[in-house]
């Protein structure tokens, strides 16, 4: 009888041990999923004034406060006399000037080629980006209605005017700026537009284009692109320029230095 009781106790202990192992495995999996989800999202680290967000395909806006999460599919907007900073996957900083709207299309999402890809589109306003250097299996781009910039290890400022024209200024590093559709490869030149034979139909809302170009924009260089996606000016800029004395630029430079 005593031996039977001992066997039952042993079996019970083994069962409890098995459940304990299974519970531990569940916790490990849940932790791994949590870490993965955190690596694919961002957080609002600063709000001055008022900011809002919505899903790109929805109509309802929600107020955004410090420590609010943002992820792929979110649209974020700052209101008048407001600004905000987003930290993406603890790697990259995106700052939004007053009356700025961005669409976070992708945030560190893995592609079929096993590349972790992030895509942000600046619809209107002024954006400052401090993007960490990326490995070969990571891509980070910030687009506008007329052009897109592939970014790695770069500090830049991007502005989209009401007529959809855009200007990019690179403070550190370099970007590849192009108006070519994603499906087309254009070899970039350093601040020299490259013409590609055409016309041909390109994806998206644009009409037939006869010129696709790509530029390498390096430190302290700027490029302006009109509403039709054509480069209207390019060249150097200096920290002594009147535009570089604005509160927006000085605040961003101070924030970058503080966060080094």
Image: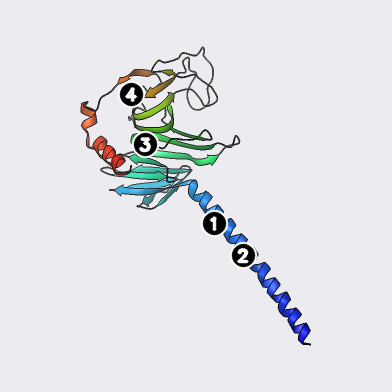
**Residue furthest toward the bottom?**
1
Mark before the other along the chain sequence, 4 or 1: 1
Q: In the image, residue 11 lies at what x, y percent? A: 73, 75
What is the tally of numbered marks visible in this picture?
4
Which is nearer the eye, 139 or 198? 139
Tell me which numbered mark, 1 or 3, is placed earlier along the sequence: 1
Q: Which residue is mark 2?
A: 23
**Mark sitting earlier along the chain (4/3):** 3
SS category of the residue bearing label 1: helix
Location of residue 13 in the rendering, given as x and y in whole percent from the top left corner: 68, 74
Observer-nearest residue: 235 or 182?
235
Residue wearing tag 4: 222
Q: Nearer the viewer, mark 2 or mark 3?
A: 2
Assign a secondary structure to mark 3: strand
Q: Is residue 139 above or below residue 184?
A: below
**Residue 98 appears in the picture as rendered:** no
- Mark earlier in primary sequence (4, 2): 2
Check disc 3 and report the residue beneath it.
129
Q: Are marks 1 and 3 in contact (CB under 8 Å)?
A: no
Marks 4 and 2 sit apart, C-alpha to C-alpha, by 56 Å
- The label shown at residue 207 is none
Q: Is residue 168 left or right of residue 148?
A: left
Point 70% across, 76% down: residue: 12
Q: Residues within 10 Å of mark 1 (few under 14, many from 20)?
A: few
Q: Residues within 10 Å of mark 2 (few under 14, many from 20)?
A: few
Secondary element at image label 2: helix
Marks 4/1: CA distance?
Answer: 44 Å
Asked if 195 appears above or below 219 in the picture, the reply is above
Residue 103 in the image: x percent, y percent? 43, 39
């Amino acid at each position: 009888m005593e031996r039977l009781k001992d066997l039952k106790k042993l079996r019970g202990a083994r069962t409890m041990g098995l459940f304990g192992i299974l519970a531990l495995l569940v916790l490990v999996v849940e932790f791994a999923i949590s870490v993965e989800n955190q690596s694919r999202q961002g957080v609002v680290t600063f709000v001055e004034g008022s900011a809002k967000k919505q899903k790109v395909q929805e109509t309802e806006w929600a107020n955004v406060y410090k420590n609010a999460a943002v992820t792929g599919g979110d649209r974020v907007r700052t209101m008048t006399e407001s600004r905000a900073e987003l930290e993406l996957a603890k790697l990259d900083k995106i700052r939004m000037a007053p009356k700025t709207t961005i669409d976070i299309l992708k945030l560190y999402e893995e592609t079929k080629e096993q590349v972790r890809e992030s895509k942000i589109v600046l619809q209107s306003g002024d954006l400052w980006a401090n993007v960490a250097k990326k490995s070969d299996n990571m891509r980070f781009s910030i687009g506008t209605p007329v052009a897109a910039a592939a970014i790695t290890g770069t500090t830049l400022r991007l502005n989209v005017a009401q007529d959809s024209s855009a200007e990019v200024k690179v403070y550190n590093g370099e970007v590849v700026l192009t108006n070519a559709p994603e499906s087309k490869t254009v070899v970039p030149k350093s601040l020299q537009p490259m013409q590609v034979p055409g016309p041909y139909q390109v994806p998206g809302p644009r009409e037939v284009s006869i010129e696709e170009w790509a530029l390498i924009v390096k430190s302290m260089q700027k490029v302006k692109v009109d509403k039709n996606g054509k480069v209207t000016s390019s060249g150097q800029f200096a920290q002594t320029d009147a535009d570089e004395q604005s509160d927006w630029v000085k605040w961003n430079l101070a924030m970058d230095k503080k966060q080094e």
